[in-house]
Structures are given as C-alpha cells and as structure tokens.
Image: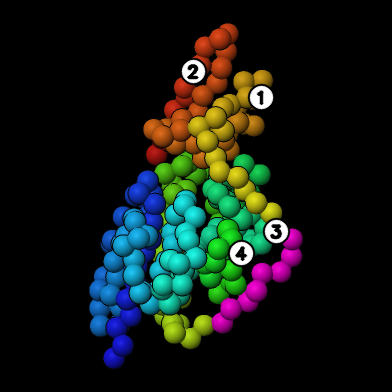
Amino acid sequence: MTRYKITFLIDKNNDWIEKKIKNLFKNNNKYFFKIEKNFKKIIKQDIVFILNYTKILPKSFLENNHLNLVVHASDLPKGKGFAPIQWQILKNKNKIPICLVIANEKFDSGGIIDKRYFYLKGHELNDEIRDIQAKETVKTVKNFLKKYPNFKIKQQIGRSTFFRRRFRSDSELNINSNLKKNFNLLRVVDNKKYPAFFKYKNNKYIIKISKIIN
C-alpha cells in the first residue's frame, strides 16, 4: 500500500491551528503526517496543506510538491487575501464559506476542490471563533483525505475581491458609536496581540473583552 507523505505548513504565529492538527492527525498505514513552519524544509511531499500561512510561496516550492492545497474561508473568488472570517464578521456575516483550493502563485486563485459552509451565532469572541475555524479546517482536510487520490477541480468563476491584511490600528473603536455598533469589532480583536482601543483627549486606552459563561 502506498503511504502518502503529508505536511501541514503553518505560520509560526498560528498556534491555535497547530493544536488541533497535533491532536487529530496521527500517522497510520496510509498517511505520514508532519507539521512544518519553514517552507524551505518541505521537499517532495504528496500533499502540502497550507493553513493560515501569511507569506507568499515561490513557484519552485509549489513545483517541488505533488499537490499544494489552501483552506480559505470565503466564497471564492470573493474575499481572497487576509483574515477573511474577521472581515466577514465585520460585515455582519454569520454564514461563512470554507473552500479547499489548489495553491498557485496568485493569492487564493486556484481551482476549488471543495466548498462548504459553517455558521456563527453572532456572540462568539476571538478565541471561540478561532476554535470553530480550526475545527472546520480539520473537517475540510479530513473530507478531502477520505476521497484522495480521487477528487475533482472546479475553476473559480466571477469577479475577484480582496481582503487586505489587518493591523493593530484596525482594532480602534469608534467612541462616537454605541457599544452595539462596536460589538463585532470587539469580537474579532485579540486581547493580547491586537486589543481593542480608543483615543480620547490625546490619550490611548485599551479595552479587553471576555465572556461570562453561565
């Protein structure tokens, strides 16, 4: 039996997805799994799952592996780029598409192998959103591996739109709006890495949010 070599390429800052992978993907007779944070160490793999990786990968890397796949949470070709779930939440979206696509030299532009949806209830905060995203990513990967090596590819159709990278400055609250209008921004901020803040009378104030679980 062929034993396929599979690598998960993740960004060093995305430990939230690494924990899910470590717990759920274990080596077996069909697959040999490993996790890598440096693309230069990935050579001649059967499948590379590129998960929340924020750097542009060179053509030589893509050609070196048999199949390179990206999991992207938007209705491609709409919403290519960065932080798609966060940007959609800020647009009051709770139905979130998640696509498995072929990686190529352009951002999130390859053929689509699978597209499904998951739903948010509108109250989840950043840690909960990340947990749901990780679980849905794992589901997408597992669904593909059940079919592999048999799968179909559909080309993306329609006009492309792009989400830009989010920065700390994007966590600024509008103090002239009410709390309800600021709530979705409070949901997507990270209390440690990029907390919500506002400026008032030449001073900057940080606000951290947490949920009381009954």
**Residue 205 numbered mark, or none:** 2
The mark nearer the N terminus, 4 or 3, is 4
Task: Determine which quarter of the picture holds residue 177.
Answer: top right
Q: What residue type is labelled 2?
A: Tyr
Do labels 4 and 3 touch, CB within 8 Å? yes
Inter-mark Cα distance, 3 to 1: 32 Å
Mark 4: give few (<14), some (14-19) or many (20+) Cα within 10 Å: some
Image point 35% across, 74% down: which residue? 44
Q: Which amino acid does label 3 sit on?
A: Ser
Q: From this viewpoint, which residue is outermost toward the right? A: 159
Asked if residue 27 is among those painted magenta in the image, a careful observer would answer no
Image point 26% across, 70% down: which residue? 26
Q: Vertically, is 23 above or below 15? A: below
Q: Position of residue 59 (x, y in %)?
A: 49, 65
Inter-mark Cα distance, 2 to 3: 37 Å
Q: What residue is pinned by disc 3?
A: 160
